[in-house]
């Protein structure tokens, strides 16, 4: 681990300086946290599974023309990504009421939403990631109206595609969180999908039984967390070798 300069350490991942300028190495840890770090634990093998699942989903999204930071997987726990300037927003897309939305509006979990809902949260551990409106985002300069349009349109395309992909393997995509970054190339700037997409950042329910196959198993002490992540990888046809 001492071989590369560490750029950033998050709750579930570490970013190291990459082998070429403009690249980073994203390392996936087994550490799990929930409720803004109030609950912590370890899920054995989670880093390996999330590295593979996120690789798979980013590649499939890339194939349909969604720009991403993903370059290639390097090994069991690391992937090479492009260095981007992270936009300090968590973009949540919801298809079915669950989690904080169910709580806020007094809906029972599992209630289908009239249409998918996109929400913006300001990334700040100190403030517990408060929900923000487009007004806050543009007024405080976190993103421009054009950036917001681009992120909204990418978020909806990503949702459409992932809903279908998961449906094909018997999984309901209830909601998920994504992050975007700015990729600079001379005077050009492109907004790309960054971070990860994995059972840590999605709610995935078995289509037949309704069983949770995501981090809610850890958040709610349901047990079988590693097995659930493994089952997601198995259904996607990407169980890690070895
Ligand atoms: O908790 P809430 O219902 O707002 O979460 C919505 C979705 O966003 C869930 O899939 C959850 O896993 C994800 N999320 C996340 N990181 C956060 C907050 C939510 O990945 N900090």
Image (cartoon, helix red, strand yellow):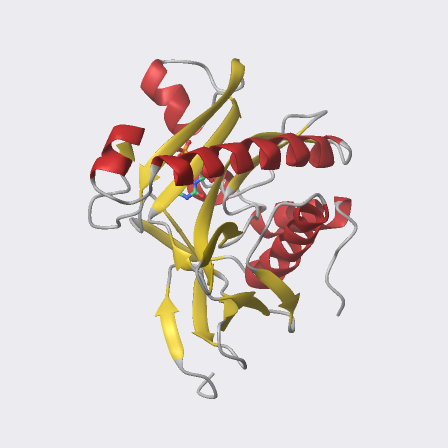
Quadrant in the picture for the C terminus? bottom right
Q: Nearer the viewer, residue 241 or 182?
A: 182
Q: How many marks?
A: 0
Q: Which quarter of the picture shows residue 78? A: bottom right
Position in image of residue 118 (x %, y %) = 45, 28
Q: Nearer the viewer, residue 8 or 140?
A: 140
Position in image of residue 149 (x %, y %) = 44, 33
Looking at the image, the residue that sits furthest to the front is 187
Give the answer, above or below, for where 165 lies relative to 226: above
Position in image of residue 163 (x %, y %) = 66, 31
Any part of residue 26 in sight: yes
Residue occupying image coordinates x 50% and y 53%: 194
Residue occupying image coordinates x 46% and y 84%: 4
Position in image of residue 192 (x %, y %) = 52, 51
Looking at the image, the residue that sits furthest to the top is 114
Quadrant containing ligand 1 = top left
Residue occupying image coordinates x 47% and y 66%: 83
Any part of residue 212 in sight: no
Looking at the image, the residue that sits furthest to the bottom is 3
Q: Which quarter of the picture shows residue 14? A: bottom left
Give the answer, above or below, for where 48 lies relative to 176: below
């Amino acid at each position: 681990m001492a071989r590369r300069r560490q750029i950033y350490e998050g709750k579930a991942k570490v970013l190291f300086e990459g082998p070429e300028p403009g690249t980073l190495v994203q390392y996936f840890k087994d550490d799990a946290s929930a409720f803004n770090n109030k609950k912590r634990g370890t899920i054995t093998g989670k880093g390996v599974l999330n590295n593979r699942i996120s690789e798979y989903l980013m590649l499939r999204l890339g194939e349909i023309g969604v720009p991403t930071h993903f370059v290639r997987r390097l090994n069991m726990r690391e992937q090479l990504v492009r260095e981007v300037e992270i936009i300090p927003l968590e973009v949540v897309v919801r298809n079915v009421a669950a989690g904080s939305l169910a709580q806020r509006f007094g809906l029972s979990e599992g209630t289908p939403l009239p249409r998918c809902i996109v929400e913006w949260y300001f990334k700040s551990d100190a403030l517990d990631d408060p929900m923000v409106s487009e007004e806050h985002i543009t007024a405080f300069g976190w993103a421009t109206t054009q950036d917001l349009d681009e992120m909204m349109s990418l978020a909806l395309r990503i949702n459409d595609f992932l809903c279908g992909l998961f449906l094909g393997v018997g999984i309901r995509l209830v909601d998920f969180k994504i992050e975007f970054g700015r990729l600079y190339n001379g005077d050009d700037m492109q907004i790309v999908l960054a971070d990860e997409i994995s059972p840590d950042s999605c709610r995935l329910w078995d289509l037949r039984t309704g069983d949770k196959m995501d981090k809610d198993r850890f958040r709610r002490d349901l047990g079988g967390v590693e097995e659930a992540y493994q089952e997601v990888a198995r259904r996607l046809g990407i169980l890690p070798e070895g």
